[in-house]
Each structure stands twice: as C-alpha cells, then as structure tokens.
Image (tube, helix red, strand yellow):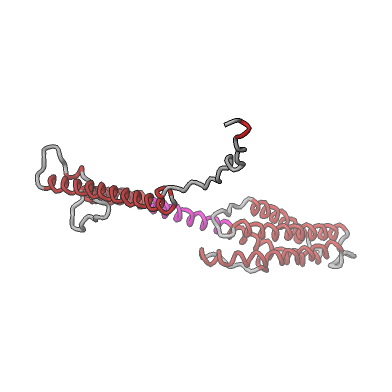
Amino acid sequence: MAPDDRPAPSPYLDWEPERLPAETPAWRRAPVLIGVVAALLVLALLVLALTGWLVVGRTDAGGAAAGSGGPAGTNQADVAPPIWESTPADDTDPTLATGDAAADAGAQTDEETGEQAEEPVAEQAEEQAEVQAGSGKEARRQARELDVLLSSSNSSRSDLTEAIDEAVLCERAGLDTIRDITNARRRQLTAARRLTVSALPDGAQLRDALVTALDASYQADLAFLSWARKLAADGCPGVGRDHRDYRRGLDWSKAAHEAKTRFVRTWRPVAKKYGLTVWKARQI
C-alpha cells in the first residue's frame, strides 16, 4: 500500500485512561494495626506476669528449703521476708533483748548517779543553810548597830529642848549644850552614812532615809546654835524666839520630822523582826 493510501492515525490512539489510586493493602489499615499493637501489649503483660510468678515461686521454695535444713552456707536470716509479712509479737528479737539489757544497765547507772548526786545536793543544802544563817546573823548585827545610832540620836533630841530653854534664860549652859548636841549630831550623820545595811531588807532605802533625817536635824542644830550665840553675845535682850536663826531652826526641824516619819515606817518591820526598839519619829 502506498504511503499516501494509508489511513490517517486515529486521534484516540494516544489516549490513556486515568489511573485509579492504588488500593491500600488490608494489613496496613488502621483497625488492623491497632489490633496488632493491642495483641502485642497483652502478650508482653502475660510474659511479665509469668516471669514474676516464677521468681516468687523460686524465692518461696528457697526459703522453705533453708528453714528445713537446706544446703550448708544458707542462712535463714539471709533471706529477707516479704514486706507484707509482720514479725509475730511473741518472737524474740536479739536487738530488743540487747536494748532491754542496755535499759537495765542504764537504770543501774541512773541509780548510782542519783546516789552520787545526792551527796553534792545535800552538801549544797547545808552550805546554803550556813550562808542563810550567816546572813541572818549579819542582818541582826547591822540592825543592832543602827538601833544604837538611833538611841544616841534620841538622847541628843531630848537634851536640845532643855538647852534652848536655858539659852532663852541667858544661861551659859544652854549655849554649851546646844554646841555639844550639834557636834554629836555631826558624828551621828557621819556614822549613818557609813552604815553597812547590805543584809537588811531594803537596807539602802532605810539608810538613805535615816541620813536625810539626821542631816535635816544637823541643819536645825546649826541654826539653833547660831541663834544661841547671838543671844549670848547681845546679853540676851533683843534676841528671842522671833530671831531668823531660830525660825530657820524650826523649819529644819519640821523637815527632819517628815524625814524621820518616812524612816520609821521602813524601820518598824526590821525592829520587830530582830526584837529591837520600834522608834517613833519624835524620838529620833
């Protein structure tokens, strides 16, 4: 056939049908894969359970063999009991026995220590009693020393009233007596300041109150002495109880009485405790 006589090629010869997507194999589908994974997990759990059962069975068998006289070198203490098993209450624990022995030894040691400690305690009690007794004796001595000073002050005060009356009458003895009383009061004041009152209750307060009272009395004596001297120098006329020195003496006497009142309130319980004179303010 001549080339020109051949039929024209069909336009449909080059056509190819559209390829359909390949179908996924059944074993790769999701439900199948999930089932396979679940089966593998179940199988693994069964293997683990079987292995644990075998291990526990061997442990129990070994413990039983050791308890019934197993091979040499196997010690029942080497096999630890399961944690869920508790030791019977009546079993004897060596550590507890050791603890009991230690407790008994400790009790004996405590008894010995207590007996040894009783001696120092008794000695300390005796020493404390001796110290208290010594403090009591010292307090009594200090209180008596203060009482003697108060007695001296009482004598000076009673003599002062009589001396003033004599001075008003221009008697020389009155002036001399006031001078002697003033000197005595100065010595009393110095002695009061030097008093030891550490063992007395409220001793410092007691001494300070007495010093204040005696100092005011000393200032009053000085004022009366100045008055009596001027009275004697002027021959008595014109100088009487209205003189400023006499009035100053009265003012100091009032201050001294107030201080003595405060003092006797503190002195009263001390005097009663040691059986001494309970002085009143007007007697000091």
Q: Is residue 133 magenta?
A: yes
Residue 101 in view, yes or no: no
- Tell me: 83 left or right of 153: left
Q: Closer to the camera, 191 or 205?
A: 205
Q: Quadrant of the C terminus?
A: bottom right
Residue 92: x %, y % from top left: 18, 52
Residue 133: x %, y % from top left: 44, 55
Q: Residue at point 62% right, 61% down?
A: 150
Query: What secondary structure is the magenta-colored segment mainly?
Result: helix
Q: Residue at point 40% right, 52% down?
A: 32
Q: How many marks?
A: 0
Q: Is residue 107 magenta?
A: no
Task: Tell me the quarter of the picture where residue 219 sits.
Answer: bottom right
Per the rendered image, the range of residues in magenta is 124-145
Reply above or below: 52 against 217.
above
Residue 70: x %, y % from top left: 11, 42
Reply above or below: 9 against 197.
above
- Tell me: 236 left or right of 32: right
Residue 106 in view, yes or no: yes
Q: Residue at point 24% right, 55% down?
A: 85
Task: Tell me the quarter of the picture where residue 66 sits.
Answer: top left
Residue 197: x %, y % from top left: 58, 54
Q: Closer to the camera, 190 or 38?
A: 38
Q: Closer to the camera, 182 or 115?
A: 115
View extreme (right): residue: 238
Q: Quadrant of the N terminus?
A: top right
Q: Closer to the camera, 194 or 48?
A: 48
- Tell me: 281 left or right of 119: right
